[in-house]
Image (spheres, rainbow, N blue to C red):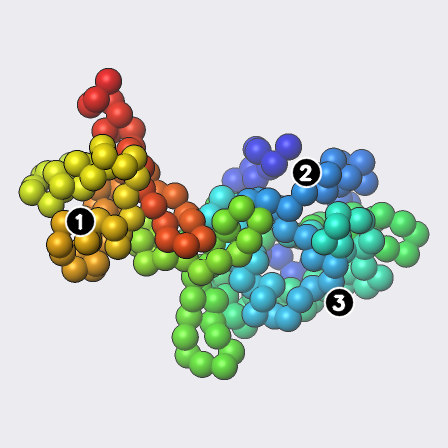
């Protein structure tokens, strides 16, 4: 149900739609899927920085829903004052998010006095979206991994940028690139630190090689909780077919 729900780019809105496009039955079906890569539940709006992490992680990864008024166990409770939640959400996004993330807000009435606030976002053409730390000048990028919001790796951040050379990249396979392909053939996946040790090079250089090969579709990037990893991409699979 989560596929095909974003018809074009959306502008950030400060008020919800007067009429929801989602019925209570549709909401129940969505909630029944449980939290995952594209779906996050919140009983109430969390502290500002935390909610911005959740929204930007969705926009930085693959888009999805943040549902406010849903308990962790999936019970549809709703909130008494959706306008208060919406105001707090927009204030948090304006204060802590850069660049601006496009979201669409809806209210879904679940009882006479309770409403679920639905926050929808698509995968963003403006990513990476950064979250400002209110206690310092630091800025972090967050992504989704399964049902969690985690800090993005250096490689994930680099691959988010819409480089004009990102499509149809051709690279020269030197000695280090061939070492990477050898390691990939041996173990089926590579990581930056694992490749750096294998090739006896600095992790920074290993990262640059892996990012270039991923842009060239030789590798495919996978977000992971411990360390991102890379597997054979379409270009490599076509060559070996």
Which numbered disc flags the more N-terminal residue, 2 or 3?
2
Please name which of the two marks, 2 or 3, marks the residue nearer to the observer: 2
Location of mark 2 (residue): 33
Give neighbour class at mark 1: few <14, some 14-19, many 20+ (Cα, 10 Å). some
Location of mark 3 (residue): 84
Q: Residue furthest left?
A: 175
Location of mark 1 (residue): 198
Position of 222 with respect to 15 (left or right) is left
The residues bearing labels 2 and 3 have C-alpha atoms spaced at a distance of 27 Å
Position of 200 with respect to 45 (left or right) is left
Residue 197's spot in the image, x, y percent? Answer: 19, 53
**Would you identify the image quadrant in which residue 190 lies?**
top left
The residues bearing labels 1 and 2 have C-alpha atoms spaced at a distance of 41 Å
The residues bearing labels 1 and 3 have C-alpha atoms spaced at a distance of 54 Å
Residue 179's spot in the image, x, y percent? Answer: 13, 41
Residue lying at 75% horizontally and 44% vertically, measured from the top left: 20
**In the drawing, what numbered circle is on residue 35?**
none
Report if residue 7 is visible in the image: yes
Residue lying at 16% horizontally and 60% vertically, measured from the top left: 202
Give neighbour class at mark 2: few <14, some 14-19, many 20+ (Cα, 10 Å). few
Position of 192 with respect to 182 (left or right) is right
Residue lying at 73% horizontally and 62% vertically, measured from the top left: 44
SS type, badge 1? helix
**Would you identify the image quadrant in which residue 25 lies?**
top right
Please name which of the two marks, 1 or 3, marks the residue nearer to the observer: 1
Which numbered disc flags the more N-terminal residue, 1 or 2?
2
SS type, badge 3? helix
Which numbered disc flags the more N-terminal residue, 1 or 3?
3
Residue 191's spot in the image, x, y percent? Answer: 29, 48
């Amino acid at each position: 149900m989560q596929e095909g729900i974003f018809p074009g780019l959306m502008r950030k809105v400060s008020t919800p739609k007067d009429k929801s496009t989602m019925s209570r039955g549709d909401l129940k079906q969505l909630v029944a899927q449980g939290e995952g890569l594209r779906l996050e539940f919140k009983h109430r709006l969390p502290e500002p920085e935390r909610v911005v992490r959740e929204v930007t992680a969705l926009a930085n990864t693959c888009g999805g829903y943040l549902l406010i008024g849903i308990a962790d166990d999936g019970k549809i409770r709703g909130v008494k004052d959706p306008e208060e939640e919406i105001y707090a959400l927009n204030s948090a996004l304006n204060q802590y998010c850069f660049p601006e993330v496009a979201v669409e807000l809806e209210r879904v009435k679940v009882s006479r006095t309770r409403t679920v606030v639905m926050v929808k976002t698509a995968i963003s053409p403006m990513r990476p979206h950064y979250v400002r730390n209110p206690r310092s000048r630091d800025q972090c990028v967050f992504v989704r991994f399964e049902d969690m919001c985690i800090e993005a790796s250096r490689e994930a951040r680099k691959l988010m940028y819409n480089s004009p050379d990102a499509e149809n990249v051709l690279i020269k396979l030197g000695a280090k690139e061939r070492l990477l392909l050898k390691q990939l053939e041996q173990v089926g996946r590579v990581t930056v630190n694992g490749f750096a040790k294998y090739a006896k090079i600095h992790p920074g250089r290993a990262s640059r090689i892996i990012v270039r090969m991923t842009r060239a579709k030789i590798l495919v990037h996978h977000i992971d909780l411990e360390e991102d990893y890379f597997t054979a991409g379409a270009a490599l699979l076509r060559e070996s077919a």
